[in-house]
Structures are given as structure tokens and as C-alpha cells.
Image (cartoon, grey):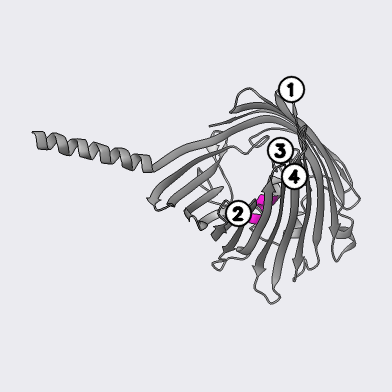
Amino acid sequence: MKKSLLALAALTAFAGVASAQSSVTLFGVIDANMRNVKNSTGSLKTQSTDGAGSSRLGLRGVEDLGGGMRASFWLEGSVNVDVGGGAKTAATANGSGANGQDWQRRATVSLSGGFGEIRLGRDYTPDFWNHTVFDPFGTNGVGSSTNLFNATASGGATTIVRANNSVGYFLPGGLGGIYGQAMLAAGEGAAGNKHMGFRLGYAAGPLNVAFAYGKTDVTAGPPSVDWKRMNLGASYNLGFMTLMGQYITADVSGGASNGTETTNYLIGGNVPMGGGVFKFSYVKSDGDGPTAALKARDATQFAFGYQYSLSKRTIVYGHYSRVSNKAGANYTASSGGLANALGKGSTGYEFGVNHSF
């Protein structure tokens, strides 16, 4: 009897140690807002799920392997709060299944330690991550700087935001403020999937600055088609506000879209104010390319908004943006809005609630 009790006690203690060395966490963001976008063709009122942050549901876990080594995983998928379902994206190389919940936002497994982190799976590309970090609106909602992104300037690349079949490396901490990552993604025979990119930055005190570059082999040819994007972003905390700025270029080389280019400039900031944060940004987009229409694809966007914290996890918010298009541009205040006529403006506003857990 005594031996049985001792064995049970030992087993219980071992289970306690094992559970302390590994963990799995359920997390997510639920965001819903009422959005109105008005263009030359009319007005569209919708309930959106990405005003202050994209709605998502995920699982992440970590296991202590000893000796400073850890294994971890991350599964994250979009949630369509407005219809009560998972993401319903097209069955493409960049997307997921035709219906239902999936993990298309991120699906990775990692090994990390003093050497840094090696990460495999579907993940954000370094150049897009640099873009969203230095946007006051985090590339979400009607204020997102991605509203002024020329889709034709991607040349058919599927790696604008994320890459499938990727292997990534992240520098360890403790390098005097230097951080960085690199990514290689296998094409696996699919057009627009093969990608390489990196991000290198420095963050210390009030300053954060980073440079990122990405290149995607859209087609092997002949003729071969490549899509490249470069991003230089920075932020500086002045105490009363955090100022942000970006310079982004994206261009296509080869094929029918050879020479198509979009250059964006952003300046903006976050200002703590009355229990919340006031956000603003100004974005200028210059188009270029082999045709007069592409050269005339210029536009500007001014956006501002306020996010009030009801708690550490819940905010209410309101955002507004105004897009002004030159003769060859037809950008809108939301990528999901109505089509717009060339040279006509677009306005958008939204009011919503965001809760994280």
C-alpha cells in the first residue's frame, strides 16, 4: 500500500513538472463595426470584421525541451463575425479551403533557443510585416495604408501578405537592439509562390527603424516575371505622441507588366488622449509603368480615428478616411467597397468594438 502511494505521488509530481514545461493557449480577437464607403458609383453600408484589428481565432503552444531550447506551434485563422463562420476564401495557393474555418492567417511550428528561432509553415512575409508595424492603423480598417496599393503592381504574386511552404529564421534577442528575420518559401510548382525576403531593424529607447525586402518569382518563363517590394519604416516616441513614417516601392520585372511600379509614402502617428489613442496618417501613392494610364495612377489618402479603451482587452473606435484620386487612379477607402470611377474620390467611416482574449 505504501509503495502504491509513493508511486502515485511520484507520478503526480512528474505530471505537474511536465505540465509546467508545456502549455497550450486559446487566443483571439473579435472585431465588428458598421462601415460606410461612398464612391462615385454609390454608397455601400456593411458590417466589417477588421476595423481596429482582424477578427481571428487561434491556438499556440510551447514546450520546454531543456538546455534553453523550446518547441512551439501557432495556428491562427480568420473569423467572420458578421455571419458567424470561419474564413471563406477561394481555394488558391495563397488562400485556403473554399469554406469553413482554417488556419490561413498563420500555421507554423518552431524551434528556438540561444541561436534564435527557426520557423516553418505559412507565415507573414518580412516585407509585409514591416509595412503593418509602421502603419498607425496596422493595415486594418478604412484608415489602412494598403487602400492605396495597386493590385496590378504585384504581377500575380500570391505573397503580398503571407507565404506558404516557408522556412524562416529570426535573430535572438540581446543583440543591442538589433533584430531581424529571413524567409525562403518554396514554390512547389505553383505560379507566384516562390519567395525570398528579409527584415533587419534596430529598436532602442524611443527609436525603432527597419528595412525589409521581398522578391517573388511569379513565373519561370520565358519570359520570367518577378515581383519585388522594398520597405523602409521608422517610429519615434516623442513622449506626447509616437511619430511613424514609411517609404515603400513595389515593382514588376518581365512579362506584359514589365516596369509597373507603385511607390507609397506615409507619415502618421499615435497620440495618447483621454483614456484612448488618436490615430492619423497621410499616404501618397505614385504610379509608374510602360503606359500613360499606369503613370497617371496617383492618389493620396488622409485618415484619422480614435480608439478608447474600456479595459485592457476591449476598445471602442471610430475611423474616417478620404481618398483623392488623380485622373488614372480609382482607389477606394476600403478594399471591400464599391468599384470607383477613374479620377473620383472615395470616403469611408466605421464605428465598432474590438475585444481580445
Residues shaded magenta: 125-130
Task: Give, as a three-letter code, the residue at label 2.
Answer: Leu
81 vs 264, left or right, is: left
Q: Residue at x 78, y 32 (%)?
A: 240
Q: Are marks 2 and 4 in contact (CB under 8 Å)?
A: no
Residue designated by label 3: 141
* Residue 81 seen anywhere in this rendered image of the structure: no
Q: Residue at x 54, y 49 (%)?
A: 106
Q: Which is more N-terminal, label 3 or label 1?
A: 3
Residue designated by label 1: 274
Q: Residues within 10 Å of mark 2 (few under 14, many from 20)?
A: few
Asked if the stretch drawn in magenta spans residue 226, the answer is no
Tell me the quarter of the picture where residue 22 sits: top left
Residue designated by label 4: 235
Q: Residue at x 68, y 48 (%)?
A: 203
How far apart marks 2 and 3 lie (CA) works out to 35 Å
How far apart marks 4 and 1 lie (CA) works out to 22 Å
Task: Give, as a three-letter code, the residue at label 1.
Answer: Gly
Give the number of the disc on residue 175. Answer: 2
